[in-house]
Image (cartoon, rainbow, N blue to C red):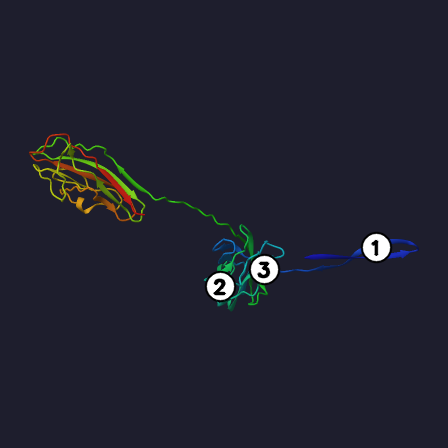
């Protein structure tokens, strides 16, 4: 910097005065400054106020030099007098230092409040334009939420943080947290697609058959069970015998039974389908084997499951002495989930 100093001289002559001004001398003061760090960034492991987290500092050096100590002074402003952000701490629980881009053995110093410091026991040489990364761990963020603060970074040629080599300032900020919530209710989806199943006109030489479908899914951890409830085919006081044990269809014999399979004799039904894990129950999961016992489980899933579609196959056979009439039954399928 340049400064100009001027001296004034006053000469008195017989009561009349005049002022003579002139230049006494010039003095010039030159101050040297450290080079600028470029490509600077400052990343917080967590931006939550008061969080114990890591600070990652990236920068590119401005000079070809050897530096043996590092400082990142935390300030509420980018320049001027540095005021440490309230709540910022490096002394408790104590920071750690890592870097894969610096040579030498580095030791953290927590002695200076408001500053992240480390010094090398061996010289760390670098050339101009070298990219560096330094990570401090276990640093406590400032306590104010949504507050910007600044890291004033300085590299020193000595290990005592005395002679600056490169400097640069970079900003970061604490932030609040966004809490996103959602709820999932307990669900059981169960539908029956057919209201009436017509088995046709029965005779001793033909088997009446038909189908209905149902779908089930649940998010219950214990899955679900589907039971069938009702009576056999009935007309007044007359009934067609229910198949109390698994058996094949037999024409000429009184039978009423169901299963949940694709059958050949008679040709009726389909296997369970869908992306879920539901299956037909043991007594109703064999092709061409039929049964009807009220209250029994016909299908189930052992855990939460996506949807499955089950096709229930119905058969009816009669003997020669079966009384004429209009036979029917009302069956109720009940799905129960275990949460």
Placement of 179 over or under 194, stated as above or below: below
Residue 268 in sight: no
Q: Residue pushed farthest bottom?
A: 121
Residue topped by disc 2: 96
Residue 20, numbered circle: 1
Placement of 203 over or under 85, stated as above or below: above
Residue 83 left/right relative to 200:
right
Placement of 13 over or under 157, stated as above or below: above
Q: Are marks 1 and 3 in contact (CB under 8 Å)?
A: no
Name the one closer to the observer, 1 or 278. Answer: 278
Q: Nearer the viewer, mark 1 or mark 3?
A: 3
Sequence-wise, which precedes: disc 1 or disc 2?
1
- CA gap between label 3 and label 2 equals 27 Å
- CA gap between label 1 and label 2 equals 67 Å
Name the one closer to the observer, 238 or 75. Answer: 238
- Asked which secondary structure carries label 2, the reply is strand
Quadrant where the N terminus is found in the figure = bottom right
Mark 2, Cα crowd under 10 Å, few <14 / some 14-19 / many 20+, is some
Looking at the image, which residue is at 83% across and 55% down?
20
Looking at the image, which residue is at 24% across and 45% down?
300
Mark 3, Cα crowd under 10 Å, few <14 / some 14-19 / many 20+, is some
Mark 1, Cα crowd under 10 Å, few <14 / some 14-19 / many 20+, is few
x then y, percent, for residue 166: 56, 60
- CA gap between label 1 and label 3 equals 44 Å
Name the one closer to the observer, 89 or 73. Answer: 89
Residue 200 placement: quadrant: top left
Residue topped by disc 3: 34
Residue 242 left/right relative to 65:
left
x then y, percent, for residue 24: 78, 59
Residue 6 placement: quadrant: bottom right
Q: Nearer the viewer, mark 3 or mark 2?
A: 2
Q: Give the number of marks.
A: 3
């Amino acid at each position: 910097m340049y400064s100009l100093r001027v001296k004034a001289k006053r000469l008195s002559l017989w009561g009349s005065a005049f002022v003579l001004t002139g230049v006494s001398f010039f003095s010039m003061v030159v101050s040297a400054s450290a080079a600028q760090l470029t490509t600077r960034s400052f990343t917080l492991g967590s931006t939550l106020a008061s969080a114990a987290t890591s600070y990652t500092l990236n920068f590119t050096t401005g000079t070809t030099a050897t530096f043996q100590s590092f400082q990142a002074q935390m300030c509420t402003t980018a320049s001027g007098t540095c005021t440490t952000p309230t709540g910022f701490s490096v002394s408790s629980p104590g920071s750690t230092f890592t870097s894969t881009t610096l040579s030498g053995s580095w030791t953290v110093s927590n002695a200076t409040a408001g500053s992240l410091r480390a010094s090398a026991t061996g010289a760390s040489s670098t050339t101009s334009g070298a990219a560096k990364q330094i990570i401090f761990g276990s640093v406590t963020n400032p306590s104010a939420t949504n507050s910007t603060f600044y890291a004033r970074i300085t590299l020193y040629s000595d290990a005592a943080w005395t002679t600056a080599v490169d400097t640069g300032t970079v900003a970061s900020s604490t932030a609040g947290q966004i809490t996103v919530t959602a709820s999932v209710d307990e669900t059981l989806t169960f539908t029956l697609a057919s209201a009436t199943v017509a088995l046709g006109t029965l005779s001793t030489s033909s088997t009446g058959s038909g189908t209905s479908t149902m779908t089930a899914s649940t998010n219950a951890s214990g899955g679900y069970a589907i039971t069938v409830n009702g009576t056999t085919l009935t007309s007044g006081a007359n009934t067609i015998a229910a198949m109390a044990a698994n058996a094949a269809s037999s024409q000429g014999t009184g039978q009423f039974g169901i299963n949940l399979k694709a059958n050949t004799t008679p040709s009726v039904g389909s296997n369970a389908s869908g992306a879920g894990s539901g299956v037909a129950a043991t007594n109703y999961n064999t092709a061409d084997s039929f049964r009807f016992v009220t209250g029994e489980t016909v299908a189930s899933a052992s855990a939460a499951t996506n949807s499955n579609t089950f096709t229930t196959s119905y058969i009816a056979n009669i003997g020669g002495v079966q009384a004429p009439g209009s036979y029917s039954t009302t069956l109720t399928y009940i799905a129960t989930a275990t949460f």
